[in-house]
Amino acid sequence: MGLVLLKNCNLIDEEGNISSGEDLLIRDGVIAARGAGLEAGGAEVMDCAGLFVSPGLTVLHAHSPMHILRGIAEDVNVDDWFNKEIWPYESKILPEDIYWGAKLCCAEMLDHGVTAFADHYFQGEQIARAAKETGIRADIAGTVFAFDGDPGPEMRPVEALMEQYRDDPMVNIRFGPHSPYICSPEVLRTLVEAAREKGGGIHLHVSETRRQVAESREKHGKTPFQVVAEAGGFTVPCIVAHGLWIEEGDLPLLGKDTFIAVCPKTYMKLGAERGPIWDQWRKVDLCIGTDGAASSNSVDPLEQARLFALLGKLADQAEDYPLREVWQVMMRGHQALGFGSGRMVPGAAADLCFWDLNTPQTAPLYDPLAAILYSADSRNIRHVMVAGQFRKRDGALAFDTAPILENASRCARDITIRGKGVSKLRF
């Protein structure tokens, strides 16, 4: 993978601490040394004077193939968005739609400084292929619905992918039960035990709406979090998508490896209410997700973190949601994904984001965290490094996006021609 020496860096670590005049030596995809005045014979030397270097960003909940449906369902309420638009279109989706949608998403995420993401979708082999080809790290949860009560047929392809990528440092596979409102408690238990047996985890949607919580109480006498807990879901590594309506009584159920991905742009776009996750955000391991581009229209975790903080300030107090704590929420996804990234120390994966804050949209610079969280966008991200390799450099992605755009447009045309089908799903 070679040797890269980054000179004269301003470093921002995962806690929001900032230091100046430091060098980073990158060897074989990891940070080999950090300090001042480093030298390394044969290294590619990059002068980072004026740049701020931080761990890359993460997306802890995405539906990357849904880039192929971006803009297809607008100005509808959440029930109609699922039941009348997205799920009927998805019932006719093809493997090539999934591949090109995921590849388009990977390109956009890298442009936004994302170095690793957690996906939840079916046909995970297409997502893994897209991620490998673009050079981004991916944690892929193969979706399991188990409509007839038998998850076996949907589990087997996920298990095959687990074997295929077991030793791959760029791809991790886990089980993706859709939710406790679609998967029965028995199915959830089966998937949890399979995850435990294979040393993996799960990723599922929990307590997305107030109505889901009420219906779960009516059906099971328990909240969705309680249903997942009784199935053992929080005893294995678990990514919870949304958790928007988590309750105080749900908090003790969460395990040490339970992380919640909040996606506020989706909640705003679909007219969802402001759930109690804002009241509980310091009591859980909160991370940033983007959902899919069919709901959020973009996959920019910086935008999502900004909206989370601003919505919180609007409803609570202006002094709440301080910069360092919101930055830490953005960085916490690295802990959940387990790729060894997210820290600025020797031995950590060299997954880095290089910020140029001397631009019209961020200058003058008083506080780098404020500039990033409230002013910056992808134009401020000059370079992105994943496993020691530049995937974006000098403001441009390291691969040709023209074929991606051309094929995504072709797939979108075909989707509109095929039209909607009949979905087994009901939100």
Image (tube, helix red, strand yellow):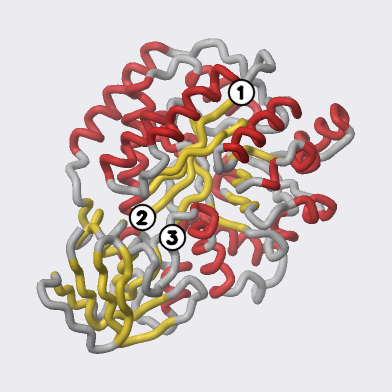
Find the distance from the CA under tag 2 to the CA under tag 1. 31 Å
Taking the spot 27% from the left edge, 81% from the top edge, the residue there is 23
Residue 399 in the image: state x and y as whole percent. 19, 46
Q: Which residue is mark 3?
A: 340
**Callout 1, which amino acid?**
Phe
Find the distance from the CA under tag 1 to the CA under tag 3. 31 Å
Taking the spot 13% from the left edge, 70% from the top edge, the residue there is 44
Residue 172 in the image: state x and y as whole percent. 44, 43
Please tell me whether mark 2 sits on a helix, a strand or a loop: loop
**269 over 183 or under it: above or below:** below
Camera-near label (3 vs 2) is 3
**406 over 380 or under it: above or below:** above
Q: Earlier in the sequence, mark 1 or mark 3?
A: 1
**Callout 3, which amino acid?**
Gly
**Callout 2, which amino acid?**
His
Q: Which residue is mark 1?
A: 145
